[in-house]
Amino acid sequence: MAGGNKFGGDDEPIVDINITPFVDVVLVLLIIFMVTAHFIVNKGMKLQLPKAATAEQLQNQKSFNIMIDKKGEFMLDGKFASLDLLKTAARNAITSNLKVVAMISADKDVVYNSVVLIMDALRSEGVSDFALQLDPSPQKK
């Protein structure tokens, strides 16, 4: 018998598989996935855009994704950059006849001067389109 002898003198092999540890691991992975998926997925709406015969695809466009932290340090497209590097990248994009759009994401506690400094540097190189990235605030009912 499988459980009759408490000293383990049983000669029958154990054929049952205990799946409890497997289920525990799967549940932990599911929780980790659910928590991190919030940070990965962009919030947006599913839209069906209207069609137009004269619609154009935007080509020759360069987006600068600029993130500014609390200390005023910033990253250009995910890499730490200096103001000179930012100006050079903008100048190169403008001379390549690319339309440059600067997407600025600044920490809410950043000094306002840091944002203005970056916008001014880009404007001096000919960039005129800016977008400020914001998180939507929860609406009160």
Image (cartoon, helix red, strand yellow):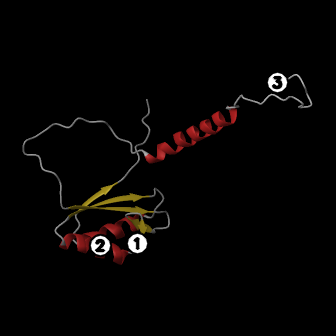
Query: The N terminus lies in which quarter of the figure?
Result: top right
Q: Quadrant of residue 125?
A: bottom left
Place of residue 112 in the rendered image (x, y in percent of width and height, measured from the top left):
41, 63
| Kind of residue at disc 3 | Ala
User: Which badge, 3 or 1, comes first in the chain's sequence?
Assistant: 3
Amino acid at dot 1? Ala
Q: Position of 88 compared to 14: left or right? A: left
The one nearer the camera, 62 or 18, is 18
Q: How many marks?
A: 3
Question: Whole-percent x and y of residue 111?
Answer: 44, 64
Q: Residues within 10 Å of mark 1 (few under 14, many from 20)?
A: some
The secondary element bearing badge 2 is classed as helix
Cα–Cα span, label 3 and label 2: 73 Å
Q: Is residue 42 visible?
A: yes
Q: CA distance from mark 3 to mark 1?
A: 67 Å
Element carrying mark 1:
loop
Residue that carries the numbered disc 2 in the rendered image: 89
Please tell me whether mark 3 or mark 1 is closer to you in this view. 3
Picture residue at 24% right of the left edge, 74% below the top: 91
Q: What residue is disc 3 on?
A: 2
Q: Which residue is mark 1?
A: 81
**Vertical arrangement, residue 68 with respect to residue 12, above or below:** below
Question: How far apart are labels 1 and 2 at the CA level?
Answer: 10 Å
The quadrant in which residue 41 appears is top left
The earlier-in-sequence mark between 1 and 2 is 1
The residue at the point 61 percent across, 36 percent down is: 27
Q: Pointers 1 and 2 in contact (CB under 8 A)?
A: yes
Q: Residues within 10 Å of mark 3 (few under 14, many from 20)?
A: few
Q: Residue furthest bottom?
A: 84
Q: Residue at x 64, y 33 (%)?
A: 23
